[in-house]
Each structure stands twice: as C-alpha cells, then as structure tokens.
Image (cartoon, helix red, strand yellow):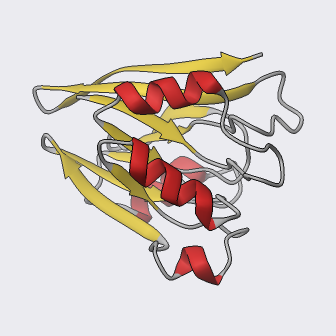
Amino acid sequence: MRLVLLADTHVPKRAKDLPAEVWTAVETADVVLHAGDWVDVPLLDALEGRARRLIACYGNNDGAGLRARLPEVTRVALDGVRIAVVHETGDAKGREARCAAAYPETDVLVFGHSHIPWDTVAPGGLRLLNPGSPTDRRRQPYRTYMTAVIEAGVLGEVALHRLL
C-alpha cells in the first residue's frame, strides 16, 4: 500500500496550488494522509476528487468550513498499522514521550504545524512523521512531502521528498 503524507499546504495563501509532483504522487498513491492547515475548502474538494482514499484532519489555520468536514484527530488502521493524523503535537522537546502517552494505541502518528520534516520513534515504538510543507518551506531549505509503504501489516520505506 503506497501512502502520500502531506501537511501545511496553506492553499491558496502560500501557493495557488500543490506542485505538479505532489499531484502526481497523490494520483498514484493508495492513500493520502493530510495533517491539517489546508486554509481553504477547495483543496480538500480537489484532494477528495483525485485521491483514491483521503485521511485527514483540520489544523489551526482552518476555518469553520474545513472544521465542519474534518475532525481534529483522525484514527484509522491500514493493513493492520494503526495510524493517527493530527495537526499539532506541541513543542519539539519531549515530543516522543508526550505523543506516546497521548496515542497509546497507535503505531504511526502523522502530524504537521511546524513545517519541519520529522521522523523519529518514541519509546515503545510509536513512529512520528511530519512531512513538512510542499508549499511553504519557512526556514527550511526545501518544501517537502513524504511517501511511505505499508506491506504485510508493517510500515516499511518512508521517504522525504524535496521540492525545488
């Protein structure tokens, strides 16, 4: 199962649209996970129309229209891998222990907010993934997104993709 991980797209405030490379990844993925900060409803509509399956939540920059359609936290099992998608996880210091306590029945936590790519494992095995932002690099050297593979009930290859 091929996954695309997105967060902090901020369309149309930071970009008019997602980069073409991201749309190609979305259209070839089995599942797209978006960890909030969409900013406007049309991108949600577009992703729902182009992704085979979309799993998403809202972020702190998302208004009533998005909050009416998306939860604050989304939980799903994909081929036996328990995944939660949330926008904010708080300060980087202590994140692994804090998230492991907050999401005890989770194998993978996809999050956003910072625009900083993140890939760590908490005590107890919780994998924390932040794909960064494909539209707003802030102080990062690149705009980014992630892809991942789930095979036979195991999260395998996770790749960070840099956009120029």
Please tell me how many numbered marks the rendered image carries: 0
Q: Quadrant of the N terminus?
A: top left
Identify whether 78 is placed above or below 148: below
The structure residue drawn at horizontal position 70% and vertical position 41%, both measured from the top left corner, is: 17
Q: Is residue 88 visible?
A: no
Outermost residue toward the right in this view: 139
Front-lying residue, 49 or 123? 49
The structure residue drawn at horizontal position 56% and vertical position 21%, both measured from the top left corner, is: 160
Q: Position of residue 111 (x, y in %)?
A: 54, 51
- Residue 107 is drawn in which quadrant? top left
Front-lying residue, 63 or 113? 63
- Report the side of 142 relative to 30 (left or right): right
- Report the side of 163 relative to 30 (left or right): right
- Residue 122 is drawn in which quadrant? top left
The structure residue drawn at horizontal position 31% and vertical position 62%, both measured from the top left corner, is: 75
Q: Quadrant of the C terminus?
A: top right
Front-lying residue, 131 or 92? 131
Identify whether 89 is placed above or below 96: below
The structure residue drawn at horizontal position 80% and vertical position 43%, both measured from the top left corner, is: 15
Front-lying residue, 58 or 108? 58
Q: Position of residue 120 (x, y in %)?
A: 51, 33
Q: Is residue 158 visible?
A: yes
- Report the side of 153 relative to 107 (left or right): left
Q: Position of residue 73 (x, y in %)?
A: 44, 68
Q: Position of residue 151 (x, y in %)?
A: 17, 24
- Report the side of 101 relative to 130 (left or right): left
